[in-house]
Amino acid sequence: MSAPATTSKIPWLSRCCAWLLLICVALVPTQAAAWWQNDWSYRKQITIDTTPKGADIAQSTGRMPVLIRLHTGNFSFTDAQENGNDIRFVNADDKTPLPFHIESFDPLLGVAAIWVDIPDMPAGSAKQIWMYYGNKKAPPAGDPAGTFDADYTLVYHFDESAGAPPKDRTAYGNNAQNAPAGLNDGSIIGKGARFAAAGPITVAASPSLAVAAGGGFTFSAWVKTDVLQPREALFARGQTGSGLLIGIDSGTVFAEAGGVRVAAPHPVAKGQWTHVAVTADGKTLTLYVNGKPVGTATGALPALNSTIAIGGVPQGTTFSSPAAAFTGEVDELRLSKIARSGALIRADVASQGPDARLVQYGADEKQAGFGFGYFGIIVKSVTVDAWVVIGILGCMAVMSWFVMWTKASYVSKVDKANDAFLALFRKQGGDPLAIRAYRTDSANERERRRMAQSSIWRIYHAASDEVHRRTVPGRPLVLNAEAIEVIRALMDAHLVRENQRLARSMVLLTISISGGPFLGLLGTVVGVMITFAAIAASGDVNVNAIAPGISAALLATVAGLAVAIPALFGYNYLVIRNKNVSANMQVFVDEFITRLSELYCGRARELAQAAE
């Protein structure tokens, strides 16, 4: 006897496992080809992008300090030291360290502001640098003076404690003589100086701050005015009737120097951060608002070597018209002894402003291990509620895979055993009761054990037991039509039970198919809600803050689909296999009843005719 060529293997399942393994391998990042120093475990690629996709700056800015904003969406604060002392920046060659210094680093709030000196900013192209971290023994390496080139003569971050005068971050040490009226922790970059018309911040004259007549000069600062009043002074310097005054006149930014005035054509909005810059190159006075030139005037600066006032006018100094004290906030104030280029001023705005398009953050990398790359960013950004949903989906996935494996194994064994039994049944010459002896014959024990897995074998023996019960020793077996119907009903009942056994646990697959995507969608919606709530609370609306949270929220939907799609394929596969087995059982019942009627109902008619 030879059984049909039916296999119990499950090739589709092995192929799915192979694909799953390949996907997992693809998600695990390989060790980086180069590493600056092995003591640092992590690094992140940062791109300074001046292409149209980024800041869109067509002219070279040369050397410039660039603001690096870190938050929980693009940086794992738990992997660095609490104060950020282990952070380092390395040029694109992965060998040359870059000067930098940390303005603020708060792992509890998950925000940081770091200034990095970029030695050469190419025009209309992208430049990559590396940020290294993850060395618990590393000492601090911040270099504020090295971050700014020698032409910067004064830089105030206003990151001191309340009541402390602003400290100059350049090498010249032009610290202020007094503190502002207050500090605002939620300024455009970090802390900002608050002015309440109570008097300016003054800076003593020094050789580094002196400007010769007709010399170069640049002023830049972020400004937010609280009131729109005439001639608010942001920056003032000079002798009576002469000097430089930069201010806001009822919302209009202006600059006056040596009898020359330049003003913006449109007023700025009250309560809104605006970047203001003024440059003088000995021939032209140029005014910039938010990185764009808005006015020019022919003229040169007078000699400037007196006290500087920020947020007001120095005592005893008057200008062509009276100037009022400033009411509002100032952040990131810089002075230079040269006229900075328009490209650099535009890059400053693109680096520091709310729409920071100059800097793009890449994936985190580790020397070895899992959890980094783009997938690592997503996993690290997943919220607790999303993990709960993903955990439930994981349990559903394991359950559905177990059901698919066990049901596929079961139906394959049943199908193979049915083929073997049908081949044996037809080998007996058509007698429906000829193979009953296989049930008890020890010589056929191996064959009997093999066919005991057959659902048709079990249906057959249910019918043969009923026939055997009706057999009277010494008398020929005679079955009338009513007895045949009883046997058919008994076989149909066992067929229903076998179908129920085939369909057992299939409902778990339908739950996975229909419930998995909805659970994943629930996790995504909740994750998106939390992401937007966190953005609203922090006030950071740039794409780098939004994208990780949204992508992490979508991971729940991906998990739901990962549960539903294999379960859908497995369910359809099993349904088709179950239908084939059920059809074979139904065909056997019809064949068995027909043969039984032919043999034993015909004998009953012969006996009846003989009796007549």
Image (cartoon, helix red, strand yellow):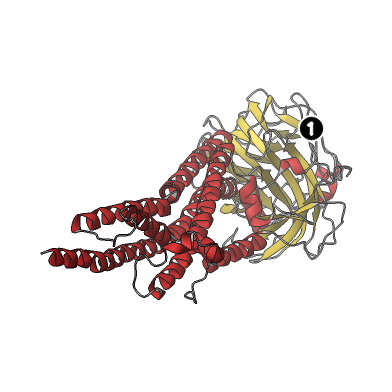
Q: Secondary structure at mark 1?
A: loop
Could you tell whether 84 is left or right of 383 in the image?
right
The quarter holding residue 418 reads: bottom left
Q: Residue at x 65, y 65 (%)?
A: 59
Can residue 225 be seen by looking at this rendering? Answer: yes
Farthest-out residue, left:
612
30 and 410: which one is in front? 410
Q: Position of residue 485 (x, y in %)?
A: 23, 56
Locate residue 341 relative to residue 457 in the image: left or right. right
Report the number of discs.
1
Q: Is residue 168 above or below residue 427?
A: above
- Count neighbours of disc 1 (C-alpha within 10 A) and say few if under 14, some if 14 to 19, many if 20 or more: many
User: According to the image, label 1 marks what residue?
Assistant: 176
540 lies above or below 406: above
Rendering coords of residue 57 (x, y %): 62, 62
Quadrant in the rendering for residue 174: top right
The amino acid beneath tag 1 is Ala
Give the quarter of the figure containing the C terminus. Answer: bottom left
253 shown above or below 565: above
Q: Nearer the viewer, residue 476 or 181?
A: 476
x 31%, y 65%: residue: 592
Along the line of sight, the residue nearer the viewer: 125 or 399: 399
Q: Position of residue 41 (x, y in %)?
A: 81, 51
Q: Is residue 522 left or right of residue 279?
A: left
Q: Give x and y (percent) for residue 530.
A: 53, 37
